[in-house]
Amino acid sequence: MKKSSLIKSLTLALIGCALASSASAAETKTQATAPWKITGELEEACSCRAACPCWFKSLPSRMTCDGAQIVFITKGRHGKTLLDGLAVGNFVQSPEHQSMFESFGKWNFDYVYIDEKATEDQRHALKEIAQHLFPAGGKTRDYRYVAISRKIEGDEHTTTVGDYALCSGHLIEGGYNGAPKVINPPLADPTHKEFLQGEATKLTYKDAGQDWKYENSNYMRNKFQTSNKEYEKYEAELAKKMAQLKPK
């Protein structure tokens, strides 16, 4: 792809991402105005080699980027609805030879998995929050209500999403003491302002017509605290940046 075509493609993708985020935020605001705030831990893995190129606007290591994010809420509230101890995850796939970034809105699939322990009110809250944590990047979005659990043994974290997926990963050693920390990547959102880099021992997924069986691929995790106010500010600033990039 020529440089000019690539720049145009990426610019259009950015605009699409911004518009989608703005539209989602506007729709959410009209449907439910309850404020929310969550403290939690993110488990993330994909088919790419570490470190994840998508957060740097780069092409996937393999033909597609097959990615998963699972958020475990340690403490949270959506309006008057408590969300402590619940989890929500997202599994997606980019088209061949395209990054998640440039193909936003055209992902092969976009599935959200919501903790089956959640009550109806909690399910509604988690679906609304998921629109911000995981902006819808496919033509459609499907939902599943399943058991989501995590087992921690030493530095190995193993997450199970129903009968559909398993993600097991650990942090890698940096050049100095501790794991490598990625801070403020180009596509950072409130839950990815910084994260620790690791390696996925195993990533499997059987849903959406997929049968993933990856080993020694990308893995990240972090602890975060965020809210509707932080995401509203982030989405507004993103929309402003994208408007400035819009071709004239």
Image (cartoon, rainbow, N blue to C red):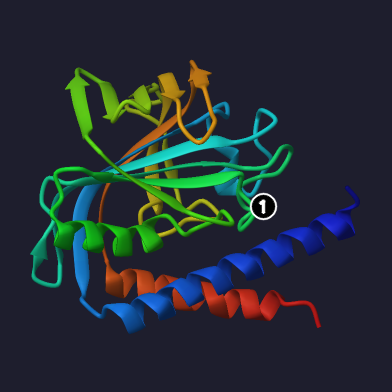
- Front-most of residues 184 and 223: 223
Residue 180 x, y percent position in the rendering = 41, 32
Residue 17 x, y percent position in the rendering = 58, 65
Q: Where 96 sits versus 57, above or below?
A: above
Residue 38 x, y percent position in the rendering = 20, 58
User: Is the C terminus in the top left, top right, bottom left or bottom right quadrant?
Assistant: bottom right
Q: Is residue 209 left or right of residue 149?
A: right
Outermost residue on the right side: it is 2
- Front-most of residues 40 and 128: 128
Q: Is residue 71 left or right of residue 76?
A: right
* SS at circle 1: loop
Q: Residue at x 64, y 80 (%)?
A: 243
Figure disc tally: 1
In the picture of the structure, the residue carrying the numbered disc 1 is 103
Q: Where 88 sits versus 81, above or below?
A: above
Q: Amino acid at mark 1?
A: Ser
Q: Is residue 119 left or right of residue 170?
A: left
Q: Residue at x 14, y 58 (%)?
A: 76
Bin the neighbour count of mark 1 within 10 Å (Cα to Cα): few under 14, some 14-19, many 20 and up. many
- Front-most of residues 125 and 104: 125
Q: Residue at x 36, y 69 (%)?
A: 231
